[in-house]
């Protein structure tokens, strides 16, 4: 039986394993590899984010919604809902390979909610006529 996510080290391992796959993924890797220039700093920020999210600690400083809106603009408004679906597939797969339990399930559920929120933020901030926005 696998253990649940228990601490920052577990989150760091999860985030590192996940983004190794993301960076190699043909569907979503190009978005991340084009926009992220300092992967070490980004991994630390993502670990902060998930530590804040799962353990209710105020360690994350940032605005994921704004970051994703900028990323969409930087990639010529080519982000589609299918990209969030692929991100979710990899996230759930990575969690399921490494952990099981209440926090593992919370990480999956929170990511589902977050991905919907982030995609809607991207879509609502596109100017009319850009990438399918009426």
Image: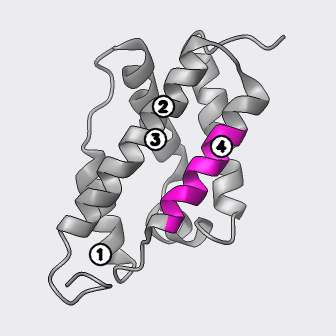
* Disc 3 from disc 1: Cα separation: 23 Å
| Secondary structure of the residue carrying numbered label 1 | helix
Q: Is tag 4's residue or tag 3's residue first in the polypeptide sequence?
A: 4
- What is the x, y in percent for residue 30? 57, 72
Residue wearing tag 1: 73
Residue wearing tag 2: 109
Left or right: residue 58 versus residue 125 is right
Residue 119 forms part of the magenta stretch: no
Residue 85 forms part of the magenta stretch: yes
Task: Looking at the picture, tell me which residue is in the foreground, 66 or 110.
Answer: 110
Question: Which residue is painted at 71% across and 52% down in the image?
Answer: 21
The C terminus appears in which quarter of the rendering?
bottom left
Question: Which residue is painted at 26% across and 51% down in the image?
Answer: 65
| Secondary structure of the residue carrying numbered label 3 | helix
| Secondary structure of the residue carrying numbered label 2 | helix
**In this view, 22 is above or below 30:** above
Tag 3 and tag 2, C-beta contact below 8 Å = yes
**In this view, 39 is above or below 47:** below
* Disc 4 from disc 1: Cα separation: 24 Å
The chosen color scheme is one colour
Q: Which label lies toward us, 2 or 4?
A: 2
Classify mark 2: residues with Cα within 10 Å, few (<14), some (14-19) or many (20+): few
Q: Which label lies toward us, 1 or 2?
A: 2
Tag 4 and tag 1, C-beta contact below 8 Å = no
Q: Is tag 4's residue or tag 1's residue first in the polypeptide sequence?
A: 4
Q: Which mark is residue 18?
A: 4
Would you identify the image quadrant in which residue 80 lies?
Answer: bottom left
Residue wearing tag 3: 112
């Amino acid at each position: 039986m696998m253990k649940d996510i228990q601490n920052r080290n577990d989150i760091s391992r999860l985030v590192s394993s996940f983004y190794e796959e993301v960076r190699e993924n043909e569907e979503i890797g190009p978005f991340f590899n084009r926009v992220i220039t300092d992967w070490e700093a980004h991994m630390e920020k993502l670990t902060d984010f998930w530590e804040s999210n799962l353990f209710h600690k105020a360690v994350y400083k940032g605005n994921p919604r704004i970051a994703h809106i900028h990323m969409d603009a930087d990639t010529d408004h080519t982000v589609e809902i299918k990209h969030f679906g692929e991100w979710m597939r990899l996230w759930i797969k990575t969690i399921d390979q490494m952990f099981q339990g209440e926090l593992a399930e919370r990480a999956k559920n929170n990511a589902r909610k977050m991905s919907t929120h982030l995609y809607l933020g991207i879509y609502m901030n596109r100017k009319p006529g850009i990438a399918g926005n009426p």
